[in-house]
Image: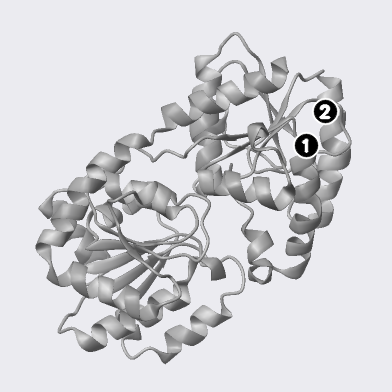
Amino acid sequence: MISGKLEGIGCFTSETLSRITRNHPEHQFLFIFDRPFADEFVFSGNVTPIVLAPPTRHPLLWYIWFEFQIPRILKKYQADLFFSPDGYLSLNTKTKQLAAIHDINFVHRPKDLPWLKSAYYNYFFPKFAHKARRIVTVSFFSKKDIHETYSIGDDKIDVVFNGANTRYRPTSEDEQQMTRARFSGGKSYFLFIGALHPRKNICGLLLAYDTFRASAESDVKLLIVGESMFKTKGIRKIYRSLQHKDDVVFTGRLSNEDLQQVLGAALALTFVPFFEGFGIPVIEAMNAGVPVICSNTTSLPEVGGDAVYYVDPSSAGQIADAMARIFHEKELRESLVEKGFAQKEKFSWDQTAGLLWKSMMDCVKN
């Protein structure tokens, strides 16, 4: 949890633990950080923050942290349970452990990651999964994937869907005009939100956008919001080849306030990853009253239900056709928005926190 830089797992951690610690003042919680922490993450008086070196920025340091430092702290404080919100566990402790394994994309797409990280994940996560007293994950797709890939009993795996931040809401026409003036030269835009990473399929989205622009009389732009992570050379190469590259805007990371406005003013969210454990931006777009073009793979049909326009992420042509339909067909946009308002009600961080707490208590008691 790093202030101003919460990605999907960071949001999951912050949203659930803020509720759990406040809702259960009868319990004491130790939050173990690997670097100086922001006070905003010490959610209540029953939270004791601990900074434990070394900062875990490398697989070797992950190993030192979880196999030597974590066991020492758990023993010192006689912890009843160690909960890991991103799946890393210690193989060197007798303390009961609960792992949140959001997905195992690295099994199916190992080349998307630097080789050392990929090797670490694929060597240690099967061991973590078997070491855990219980596992929580964020979709039935991921539950089935973990169960089948690691031969873990499915009765050991609990599904706790993600929620979406309530700050996302429909914005007024005036707000939308001001947002477009700031970010897209006053033009309408399709929007992607997420890390710039191979499995997010930015290359396919760029090619689809160029195809859409070539066939439609439109000056709609494409906004890509997020920071670079791994292996982005391919994105840069595709971008340079585009006929309409001047209408693609890379904003980098945005503040929460700007992100809310940018999402609320979008013509549609275009979220077409190859692999996703959940897909929080899909629900956030529904909260904002924005139609969604979404991949038909992995967990995303669970999240989108019948409220999104599905495409094959490997087909730039399908993505381009979806953009064209969303751009031209007002009734389609309105139908997706209406269905999205209903679908989003299935997901809330309060529900997620409650289910996670149940899993924590099941670990402690069994």
The residue singled out by tag 2 in the image is 73
Relative to 17, is 109 above or below?
Answer: below
Q: Residue furthest top?
A: 26
Of the residues under marks 1 and 2, which one precedes in the sequence?
A: 1
Question: Which amino acid type is marked by label 1?
Answer: Leu
Residue 295 vs residue 74, the one in the foreground: 295
Which quadrant is home to the N terminus? Answer: top right
Tell me where residue 274 appears, x and y as whole percent: 50, 66
Residue 45 % position (x, y): 58, 16
Q: Which residue is mark 1?
A: 52
Q: Residues within 10 Å of mark 2 (few under 14, many from 20)?
A: some
Measure the C-alpha gap from mark 1 to mark 2: 9 Å
Image coordinates of residue 208 in percent, x first then y, are 35, 79
Q: Is residue 221 above or below residue 55?
A: below
Q: Is residue 136 left or right of residue 180?
A: right
Q: Is residue 139 left or right of residue 333?
A: right
CB atoms of marks 1 and 2 within 8 Å: yes
The residue at 74%/61% (across/down) is 117
- Can the viewer see residue 115 in this picture? yes
Q: Quadrant of the C terminus?
A: top right
State how many labels appear.
2
Question: Closer to the camera: disc 1 or disc 2?
Answer: 2
Front residue of this view, candidates 53 and 361: 361
Question: Where residue 206 sits in the image (x, y, percent)?
Answer: 39, 78
